[in-house]
Every structure is written in structure tokens, then in C-alpha cells.
């Protein structure tokens, strides 16, 4: 059986945490698609051509250090605006989504472009201020600067011509600004259980 959960949303909205919890609870495979773009961004920082880097990306590239930093996120967001980079990563994501036993993918365009037929689509969001505060608690430094970076990345991810960050028409929006992570996971789990029940009927 294949069953795909698509979880999209802006940086630091909680989609990674929700995805991991869902994958664990339901026994689904999990792909953090942001990591693909972060790895391409890191290779570009070393002088590689972005399109070649995406076409030749290897599993070991996803395991390199330093991919979780704010700088790596900005580099990822820049290469993610290149249509050929996105195109090179489509097949890998689509075949992951159809893995036997179910899969959850989190990113920006999973419900709109990669898996428009996903059985469950969620769009996890929160206000820029709340997201910047969460990120600042992780990375420290100047909170105003973290907010400026969050807003810059939102703008770049949302305004790009190819696969911009927007909710799919049939996605359920989960706003985590004033919601605990446990409540967000419970809401996502309820939607998934309902979709599985419908599929089995
Ligand atoms: O989810 P993340 O913060 O790790 O993503 C890093 C960047 O990668 C994000 O700013 C935009 C890009 N990205 C994308 O364009 N499409 C995806 N499916 C995932 C990430």
C-alpha cells in the first residue's frame, strides 16, 4: 500500500517536528525535502554548478555537516528558485512518496507540485514573529536579525516563479502560532486516520 502525507509550510512553522512524529506514529518513511536543497546550496558554496549539483546529488551529500544552519537555509532558498534544480529533484521525491508502507514528505511544494495526489495535505504555518522567536531560541544572536532572515526567506520562497510556497487548494491549514506541538500532531494524526479509514472503506 502506498499512502502519502504532504506537509508544506514556511521555515520554523513546526512541519519538521510534526512530520517526524507522524512518521514514527504511523510507521511511514520520512523525507525532509529541504535537506535536498540545503545539500545543493552547500555544494554551490564550494563552487559547483547548481544544476549539476542537483542532477548528481548523492545520499552521502545529505549527511554532510552544517546543513541545518541559517546560512545553509538561505543558500538552499536561493538555489531552490532555479527551475532546473527543482526539476532534477522531482523524480527522487515522487518515488520516495510512493514507497510501500506510506511516506511523509515535508517541504514547500509537496502538495502542489510533487504529490498533488497525496492522500493527506497539510500546510503548517505560524506568524513570522513566532517562527523567528523559535529559531532564535535555537540559534541565539540578535532576534531582530533572525526575524529579518525569516522574512527574507519567506519572500524568496513565496515570490519565485516555479513552485512557490502556497497552500494547495485542498490542504488543511494548521496554524501553530498559539498551538502546542502535541496539539498540532494530534490534529494531523486525526486527519490521517480519517483518510486511512476512508481508503479502507
Ligand atoms: O525546509 P527547509 O528550511 O530546510 O528548506 C530550506 C529551503 O529549501 C527553503 O527556504 C526553500 C527550499 N525548499 C524548497 O524550495 N522546496 C522544498 N520542497 C523544500 C525546501
Image: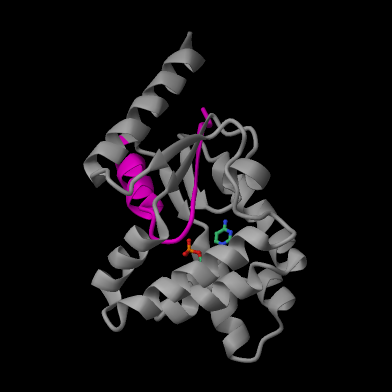
Asked if residue 118 lies in the magenta stretch, the reply is no
Please give the name of the residue rendered at 51% of the width and 27% of the height, measured from the top-left corner: 1
On the image, the x and y values in percent for residue 134 come to: 29, 64
Front residue of 134/106: it is 134
Residue at horizontal 29 percent and vertical 83 percent from the top: 141
Q: Nearer the viewer, residue 128 or 68?
A: 128
Q: In the image, residue 98 lies at what x, y percent?
A: 57, 39
Residue in view at x 53 percent, y 69 percent: 153
Q: Visible in this render: residue 107?
A: yes
Position of 1 with respect to 165 (left or right) is left
Q: Is residue 163 above or below residue 179?
A: below
Left or right: residue 198 versus residue 134 is right
Is 20 inside the magenta-drawn segment? yes
When the figure is inspected, residue 142 is found, relative to residue 89, above or below; the finding is below
Q: Which residues are the magenta region?
A: 1-25
The quadrant where residue 194 appears: top left
Viewer can see residue 59: no
Residue pictured at 58% horizontal, 70% vertical: 77
Q: Relative to residue 148, is residue 27 drawn left or right?
A: left
Q: In the picture shown, does residue 15 fall above or below 111?
A: below
Give 40 or 130, whichever is nearer the viewer.
Answer: 130
Judged from the image, the quadrant occupied by ligand 1 is bottom right
Name the spot of residue 115 as percent of width and height, x first: 62, 41
Amino acid at each position: 500500500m502506498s499512502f502519502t502525507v504532504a506537509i508544506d509550510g514556511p521555515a520554523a512553522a513546526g512541519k519538521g517536528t510534526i512530520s517526524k512524529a507522524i512518521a514514527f506514529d504511523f510507521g511511514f518513511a520520512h523525507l525532509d525535502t529541504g535537506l535536498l536543497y540545503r545539500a545543493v546550496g552547500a555544494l554551490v558554496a564550494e563552487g559547483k554548478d547548481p544544476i549539476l549539483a542537483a542532477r548528481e546529488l548523492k545520499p552521502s551529500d545529505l549527511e554532510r555537516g552544517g546543513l541545518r544552519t541559517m546560512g545553509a537555509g538561505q543558500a538552499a532558498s536561493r538555489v531552490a528558485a532555479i527551475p532546473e534544480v527543482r526539476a532534477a529533484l522531482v523524480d527522487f521525491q515522487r518515488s520516495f512518496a510512493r514507497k510501500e508502507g506510506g511516506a511523509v514528505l515535508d517541504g514547500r511544494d509537496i502538495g502542489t507540485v510533487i504529490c498533488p495526489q497525496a492522500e493527506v495535505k497539510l500546510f503548517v504555518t505560524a506568524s513570522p514573529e513566532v517562527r523567528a522567536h523559535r529559531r532564535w531560541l535555537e540559534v541565539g544572536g540578535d532576534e531582530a536579525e533572525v526575524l529579518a532572515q525569516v522574512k527574507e526567506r519567506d519572500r524568496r520562497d513565496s515570490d519565485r516563479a516555479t513552485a512557490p510556497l502556497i497552500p494547495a487548494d485542498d490542504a488543511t491549514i494548521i496554524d501553530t502560532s498559539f498551538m502546542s506541538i502535541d496539539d498540532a500532531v494530534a490534529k494531523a494524526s486525526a486527519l490521517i486516520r480519517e483518510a486511512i479509514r476512508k481508503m479502507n472503506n
